[in-house]
Image (tube, rainbow, N blue to C red):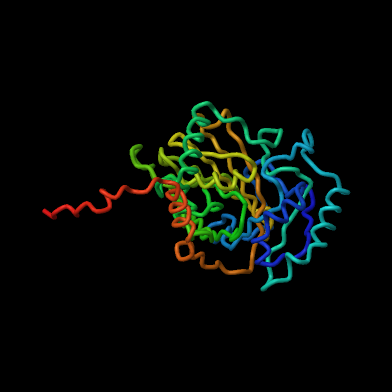
Amino acid sequence: MDTILSVGVYRRVAAVFAVVVAAAVPVAGQRSAAPSQASTNSTVPRTPDGHPDLQAVWFFGTLTPLQRPDSLAGRTHLTDEEIAAIETRSNNRPEYFGLFGDYPSYAFDKRSSLIVDPPDGKVPAMAPAGQQRQDVRSAARKAADNPEDLPPYERCILGFNAGPPIIPGGYNQNVQLVQTPDYLVIHTEMVHTARIVPLDGRPGLPAHIRQWNGESRGRWEGDTLVVTSTHFTPTGTGTLMLDGNLARTGIGWSPDENLTLIERFRLHDSNTLIYEFTIDDPTVWSKPWTVSLPMTRSSQQMYEYACHEGNYDMKNMLSGARAPEPPVDAATKTAPEPTPR
């Protein structure tokens, strides 16, 4: 496996500028995970029942692009010289660092995209039904006639990077894992979504019960914890938040009830968690695709994300959409109120 290269200790507020830094350093690659498999790594911390101890706050910010840039088409990895240039450019941007306490390090390898499958490092084409659904959702969002026309992250229902699946972007890029023999809790800092994943082999929910985050069930495959999620809602799942993150790469996504999401959690060492997910939604995507993302152990606590308290966007977007509407005529304005019954 490639050696992880640290580009220095970043500070917590640097996450706010992640998109700006990514634009300045567009080819940064972060370590890719080896294929998920059973392992006997004796160097990772373990719980009393013998499984790897995943419990920690993990930082998942990255400068690695989700998709491979066109300029690197056909190249899965960068050269040592390109990595050195990335380090130099990053270290020469002090305006983004040195603010308000320690922030976990970004770690890099030579890979040119977070997407590891398909081999071209690109999100596959949408299926016709998926593209049609996305066009409808995009048009509704532009019109913004009703709150339901806006994605759930703008409504403070779910965080736009919180998943499932978790995709880096924006700020508050931290997740806390809490683990027992029978459960895994995936608690994201943005909007404080807590996903409780049973590990005890219990049966799934009835087919008619659908949830924002789907229904998750976990199992151990050697030292890899595999979480499979199904039962997403048919009219805008929790993963609709990808409409926000993927929009940065020109991609929108409105999944449906046929989504199967497989997430894998594996400790590379005591301070590095490899998070990998595969999206399989045949009515939306022409084929499945897989992302591999390293997360770094953080000494920081989770911060409050007071989304609703500062959510002025909803009022502004909805009132702005209504501004061009024609005024109500005088007769309607002076019409008497209906008599209560």
Residue 93 x, y percent position in the rendering: 79, 62
Q: Is residue 263 left or right of residue 7?
A: left
Residue located 63% across and 59% down the image? 59
Image height of 80 relative to 290, above or below: below
- Residue sitting at x 73%, y 71%: 98
Q: Is residue 222 visible?
A: yes
Front in this rendered view, residue 138 or 30: 138
Labels in figure, total: 0
Q: Quadrant of residue 103?
A: bottom right
- The image shows residue 82 at horizontal and vertical percentages of 85, 48
Question: Which residue occupies the extreme front position in the image?
Answer: 330
User: Residue 140 versus residue 117: which sits nearer the camera?
Assistant: 140
Viewer-proximal residue, 272 or 78?
78
Taking 92 as reference, is 58 left or right?
A: left
What residue occupies the far left of the structure in this picture? Answer: 341
- Give the quarter of the image for residue 155: bottom left
Q: Is 278 positioned to the left or the right of 68 in the image?
A: left
Q: From this view, report whether residue 76 is shown above or below residue 51.
A: above
Side of 68 where 337 appears, left or right: left
Residue at the bottom extreme of this rendering: 100
Asked whether the viewer can see residue 182, the reply is no
Residue at image location 65% in from the left, 45% down from the top: 292
Please identify the residue farthest to the top as the structure is shown.
128
